[in-house]
Image (spheres, rainbow, N blue to C red):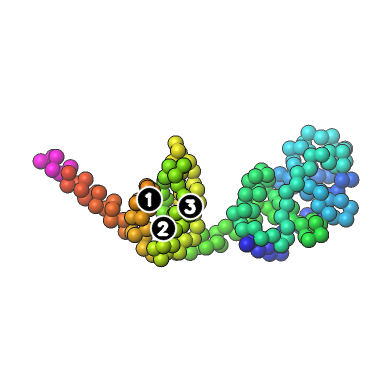
Amino acid sequence: MFQFKTDLILKIPFFTTTSSIEECMVFLRKKSLTHIPICDSEKHFLGSLSTEDLLDQDKQKAVEEIIYDLEHFFLEQDNKLNIFEIYDIFTNHDTNVLPVINSKKQLIGVICKETLLDIWPSTLFLNQPSTSIIVSHLEQHYSLSVVSQIVESNNAKLFGVILLQSIQGQVHILIKKNNHNTKIILDDLRRHGYQILTHHQEDTYLNDLEQRSQYINKYLNI
């Protein structure tokens, strides 16, 4: 669960339906935000206006004249979302700012994407001693549950799994785990059809292949 701290929430001026487009744009330019939250007179959150929508409007207009352009995404102060789910909200709405509301639906501030990115290095995924393994598999056949089971059934701790990219039907997967039983896990991943893309000193499979290749080359060159 993502825990809010007071210093993560940015307090901003309250803009209402009676605010002018020009007032909103002045603030947005100063803060370089993609959206600006709009409230009613009692600070109840109504939605957000995007910078792009505001640019096309007469600066003298009031927000209430373009109320139909409001976008309705936000975070509740007591939300139970994890950090990845919050990243998804940023991405799905193409925004760098999320309004934060309380139980009464009142705006208490915003959280910026940049602030959330600053939290990332403090997660276990990055700051624990670990082994990173990158594997690939056919897009229609990979299974994150199988990957997790392989790691944990070999008495290792899984810190996280991320889909990196898909290239010509092959999905590349980053596995972060502690340093236990890497060789066994690599062997099990191969048995399940995963190709290991990273090099590991514990990987005797690759070492054996290299030695055999050297032997064959030596034999052919006799």
Tell me the kind of residue under disc 1. Answer: His
- Distance from disc 2 to disc 1, alpha carbons, whole Å, reads 9 Å
Could you tell me if residue 70 is visible in this image? yes
Q: Give me the residue at 52% from left, 63% from top.
A: 124
Q: Give me the residue at 74% from left, 37% from top.
A: 52
For this view, does 36 lie left or right of residue 201? right
Q: Give me the residue at 44% from left, 44% from top.
A: 141
Question: Which type of secondary structure does the marked residue at label 3 adopt?
Answer: helix
Q: Earlier in the sequence, mark 2 or mark 1?
A: 2
Q: Earlier in the sequence, mark 1 or mark 3?
A: 3
User: Which residue does the numbered mark 3 point to in the structure image?
Assistant: 144
Depth check, front residue: 81 or 98: 81
User: Which residue does the numbered mark 1 point to in the structure image?
Assistant: 192
The correct choice, above or below, for 104 with respect to 221 in the image is: below
Tell me the kind of residue under disc 2. Answer: Ile
User: Which residue does the numbered mark 2 point to in the structure image?
Assistant: 150
Query: Which disc is residue 5 wearing?
Result: none
Tell me the kind of residue under disc 3. Answer: Leu
Q: Earlier in the sequence, mark 3 or mark 2?
A: 3
- Distance from disc 3 to disc 2, alpha carbons, whole Å, reads 10 Å
Whether tag 2 and tag 1 are in contact, CB under 8 A, the answer is yes
Give the image location of residue 219, x and y in percent: 13, 43
Give the image location of residue 213, x and y in percent: 21, 45
Q: Give me the residue at 65% from left, 51% from top.
A: 113
Depth check, front residue: 154 or 51: 154
Could you tell me if residue 130 is visible in this image? no
Depth check, front residue: 141 or 26: 141
For this view, does 159 lie left or right of residue 200? right
The part of the chain drawn in magenta is 217-222
Question: Which type of secondary structure does the marked residue at label 2 adopt?
Answer: helix
Is the N terminus in the top left, top right, bottom left or bottom right quadrant?
bottom right
